[in-house]
Image (cartoon, helix red, strand yellow):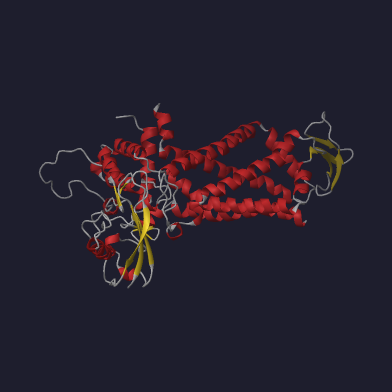
Amino acid sequence: MSNFAKTFSSSLGKKLVMALTGIFLCTFLIVHLVGNLQLFKDDAGQAFNAYAYFMTHFGPIKIVSYLLYASIIIHAVYALMLTAGNKKARPVAYAVQAGGQNSPWTSRNMGILGTILLVFIVVHMGDFWWKYHNAELPYAKYEISLDNPKDIQVSELPYDANRLVHSEIVDVQAGKQIVISKDLYKIVNNAFQTWWYVLLYVIAMAALSFHLIHGFKSAFQTIGWNNSKLLPIIRFLGVWIFGVLIPLAFAAMPLYFFFK
Amino acid sequence: MNLTLKVWRQKNAEAKGELVSYQADHVSPDMSFLEMLDVVNEGLIKKGDDPIHFDHDCREGICGSCSLHINGRPHGPKQGITTCQLHMRSFNDKDTIVIEPWRAEGFPVIKDLATDRSAFDRIQAAGGFISVNTGGVPDANVIPIPKVIADEAFNSATCIGCGACVAACKNASAMLFVSAKVSQLALLPQGQPERYRRVQAMVAQMDAEGFGSCTNTGACEAECPKEISITNIARMNRDYFTAKLFKSEE
């Protein structure tokens, strides 16, 4: 085995892979959240649909997205490998083990939380990512007044295999900008009318919160960035930004469409 | 105090063990936990039964021999002490106390509550030393070491190698022990020449002994009788990755 392969098959090397893929996935959450905030805009989904088009058709983002899918798979596969090794390290279990008295619940249940998240990611990507790429979605036609960009008329166009995914025409004479987009916004809106589907999302975001409250600071501990100067910043980011703010903002989206 | 003990009894490494109940009556709250077991054992010997085997030596918390998993926690319910420093006043009359050996692939049971912890010796032998010929006594302060660094190295060096970190960890990981042994030398000038060779050799031996991986639960530092911090683990990881990715092999 080469030195490189040996490094990443050692117990510490596997943890490094978990930490690096984990941190990369955390940075993605920020991008995903900022983009998805377009859902809250009162423009019949025009900004959100433009964003969906940009994310799926801009070259550099496409490359990053494949890195992202790979990271999710690697993070899960390495978690399974590490868990199998950890189970082998204690062949006879304790009759009594009071883990609750010496460690936080989240830190002992990362596997369960991660499994919930993996199931969620599969469902989530199946419903939106796969449909956007493969299903015969209707199109939305936005007529935006050039004088007043808040004045938007929207109409639905049926699916047409020859139509571009997104097009923008400025018709100065009519005083309008006409934007035609594949209407992912509508799919999102429809999906979140079902109560149990909304509940699934809220539960998944609770799992994300608990996963990151431990996971974010844990990743930096694994890399070795743990000292009295960095630790307070990392703890704050892990708990309040990744553990509270981001999951709450994501959970607000299905709730917003359900109660709208 | 009258107590019910549920003690792991196992004839030898190969035998299948089980929890056996014993009654411990007229226990003084001033007894140490091990003295309480001594009294129970005297009763067993008088009856002609095999006494309960457990490790102990100094009985003052510095040798790292005692090793009992008491009611689900290594060295019992108190923080910062070993089993020999635990007193029966920490329990209540009529309590049931479950006593188990350390559970880890790397710590096989020898008999009853005694485990073979020589895996730790082999990890130490793999690199937990400095290779110098000791000559005469040097003058004081020939090698200046800042107080904070000296203190930190000393804190790491207080590890007594009892294995409570492994016992407490849900993954039976030995990383707190190994990182303390790596750190006590990595922090000091004398440890520098072999710093990166040491960390790689000790981690390799740790993996070979079948210990699990760290998931940063912090259970080890919470249960460590010497209260050694998991910042040692971060330091070990940092040195290991630096060695593997940036240092040429010696």
Q: Is residue B1 above or below residue A169?
A: below
Residue A13 locus on image (x, y percent): 43, 37
Residue B226 vertical placement versus B196 (above, below): below
Q: Can residue A31 be seen in this view?
A: no
Seen in the picture, residue A97 relative to B175 is either above or below; the reply is: below
Classify residue B224 by image quadrant: bottom left
Instruction: Specify whether A28 is left or right of B163.
Output: right
Q: Quadrant of the C terminus of chain A?
A: bottom right
Residue B144 location (% of width, % of height): 22, 48
The answer to whether any part of residue B96 appears in the image is yes
Q: Identify the residue shown where x is 27% and y is 40%.
A: B122
Tell me where residue A176 sits by quadrant: top right
| Residue A190 position within the rendered picture, expressed as x and y whole percent measured from the top left | 78, 47
Q: Which residue is drawn at 73% across and 44% down?
A: A48
Q: In this view, does B247 lie above or below B22?
A: above
Q: Position of residue B209 (x, y in %)?
A: 34, 40
Q: Which quarter of the rendered picture does the N terminus of chain A lie within?
A: top left
Out of A126 and B94, give the one closest to the viewer.
Answer: B94
Q: From this viewpoint, which residue is outermost toward the right?
A: A174
Q: Identify which residue is drawn at 39% across, 66% down.
A: B96
